[in-house]
Amino acid sequence: MSSIALRPPLFLSLEGLDGSGKTTQIDRVVDLCERHNPRGVVVTREPGGTEVGERIRHILLEHASLHAQTELLLIFAARIQHVKAVIAPALAVGKTVVCDRYLDATYAYQGYGRGLEISLIDALTHLFDIPLPDITLYFDVPVAVALARRAGRTADRIEAEGGEFFERVRQGYHKRAQDEPKRFLVIPAAASLAAVGTAVEAALAGRL
């Protein structure tokens, strides 16, 4: 692997559709961060990351009859606890935080996918002082590729949505990346595992 001089504290998020390969690549990202931050790396996820957050995650993924606004508020309830109990304390002592999904997923899934007002998500983000990551790695794949990779796997409530929903989610991610090019590192993730890993290293090296 190439040598990358990460400057702690650093907050990285990984984003992408289910089936994009982002979770597969998280170990590579963590390894890079651990090499360059002697204070350590905290690996976490959303929704979840805390005991409360994991209980909310179960509700979000398993209960079929959630209204979109209820879904959004549950996500923010879990996120507030996550930021206050995990993310902010880790950054305060100089640790690197690597989070599997975060705020941009809310814009993509609940904003573009569910059709909720982006201004509502903006307002909740500002109201609760939700911090942005320093770097967001977005693993971009066509919806058809993501769905094919998930074939045969038991789907949760959100994964069970149709292709049109995920096309809107992907459009949401593209809009976020377009609006914040300094923060987003877009990784073409339809390639082989090794090729995607190389792209991750190259993207981080080029940005840092």
Image (cartoon, helix red, strand yellow):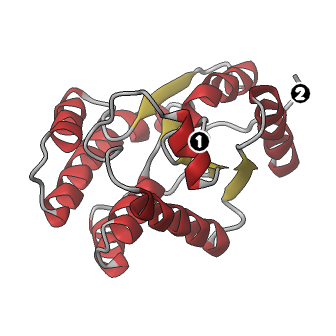
SS at mark 1 in the image: loop
Q: Is residue 112 above or below residue 191?
A: below
Return the residue at label 2.
Answer: 3
- Is 61 placed left or right of 33 in the picture? left
The quarter of the displayed image where residue 111 is located: bottom left
The foreground one among 103 and 15 is: 15
Q: Earlier in the sequence, mark 1 or mark 2?
A: 2
Q: Position of residue 69 (x, y in %)?
A: 17, 66
Residue 120, which numbered label? none
Q: Position of residue 40 (x, y in %)?
A: 59, 20
Specify the amino acid type for callout 2.
Answer: Ser
- Is 50 placed left or right of 65 in the picture? right
Q: Residue shown at 28%/61% (left/top)?
A: 128
Say whether residue 14 is visible.
no
What is the crowding at mark 2: few (fewer than 14 residues within 10 Å), some, or many (at least 20)? Answer: few
What is the crowding at mark 1: few (fewer than 14 residues within 10 Å), some, or many (at least 20)? Answer: many
For the N terminus, the image quarter is top right
- Is 24 placed left or right of 4 in the picture? left
The foreground one among 98 and 101 is: 101
Q: Is residue 144 above or below residue 1?
A: below
Q: Residue shown at 41%/34% (left/top)?
A: 45
SS at mark 2 in the image: loop
Return the residue at label 1.
Answer: 20
Specify the amino acid type for callout 1.
Answer: Ser
Q: Position of residue 67 (x, y in %)?
A: 13, 62
Residues at marks 1 and 2, CA–CA distance in whole angstroms: 26 Å
